[in-house]
Image (tube, rainbow, N blue to C red):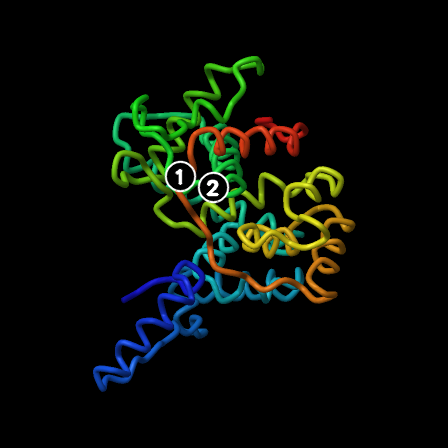
Amino acid sequence: MFCRSNECPKEFFDELDEICETAGIRFKQFELAPPDAKSAVQIVGGQSAFERVRGLVAENKLRCVGSYPAALQALSRVAPNARVTEREVWELVLRNLLRERSEDQSGVEYDLDKAYNAACRIGAVMALSGLREISRGQESIGLPSVREFFPDETPEYESRQRAADYAQRLLMVPRGEGSEFREEHVQEWLAALALADTSLERLQPILSKDGKPIQRYQGVMFLLHRISRRDEVRDWIKELHGGVPPARGPIVRTRFPLKRAGRGGMCLRAAVRGFDYG
């Protein structure tokens, strides 16, 4: 079995371990090692590019992203001596992902900036409402569609709807009667990037209850602690977790009734009025 550790519940591993022990089989877990220097040279396209990327990592204190091939590829396209933050690196990674997948859509062209903004909105609504799936356009299956994530009173409504449909096509795959993100961590990164400018006043009632973090938002809080543009948000998340940076918890997804999904969407709209697609 090959998966991200935070995408598989701990209970599943515990039960699998117990089954293997009963059967007299040793259950082993392995982790992929980060790329070494030789592999990184190949990832970024040569020794000179590697030296440039290594300089960017050192100058901008980006060691936290240096072990991710996608981040190294993104940095290989950044000018030497540029100032770049971790948030900007991951934004580049996700924009590159959209660009690469759009190249596979022969005969279809669309504004990737609009698709990226729409994808952030979709990721945020799904992460904060706990949705795993959304509708692929059918109206009878009890799942919300991306079109419900964009209020029809907003300017450029039709343009944003088309961008949302295109983002869904690029980043999501069929699952049962609906569709889900191909990679669940991409969904959380999009959500965190959508909320990076959101004020503490708006985030507190969404991410916490009675002074405690809500568990299903653990992944989003882990990312926000790293990339939020607001110092007070990062400090609050740390304080909420006992004065230490939050760990990345398991991704929690469920199939919500439409009413609850709609409430999640309303909470998000209240939280991100200042977001470009809010």
Q: Residue at x 58, y 39 (%)?
A: 194
Q: Is residue 217 left or right of residue 271?
A: left
Label 1: state its secondary structure.
Answer: helix
Q: Amino acid at mark 1?
A: Arg
- Residue 190 percent across, percent down from the top left: 51, 43
Label 2: state its secondary structure.
Answer: helix
| Quarter-of-image position of residue 97 | top left
Between residue 54 and residue 36, name the one nearer to us. Answer: 36
Q: Would you call the spot at circle 2 few (<14 residues within 10 Å), some (14-19), or many (20 or more)? A: some
**Image vertical order of residue 30 relative to residue 110, above or below:** below
- Residue 233 percent across, percent down from the top left: 73, 49
- Residue 236 percent across, percent down from the top left: 75, 53
Q: Judge whether residue 124 can be spotted in this image.
A: yes
Between residue 22 and residue 26, name the one nearer to us. Answer: 22
Residue most extreme to the right: 232
| Disc 2 target residue | 95
| Quarter-of-image position of residue 167 | top left
**Image vertical order of residue 251 relative to residue 5, above or below:** above
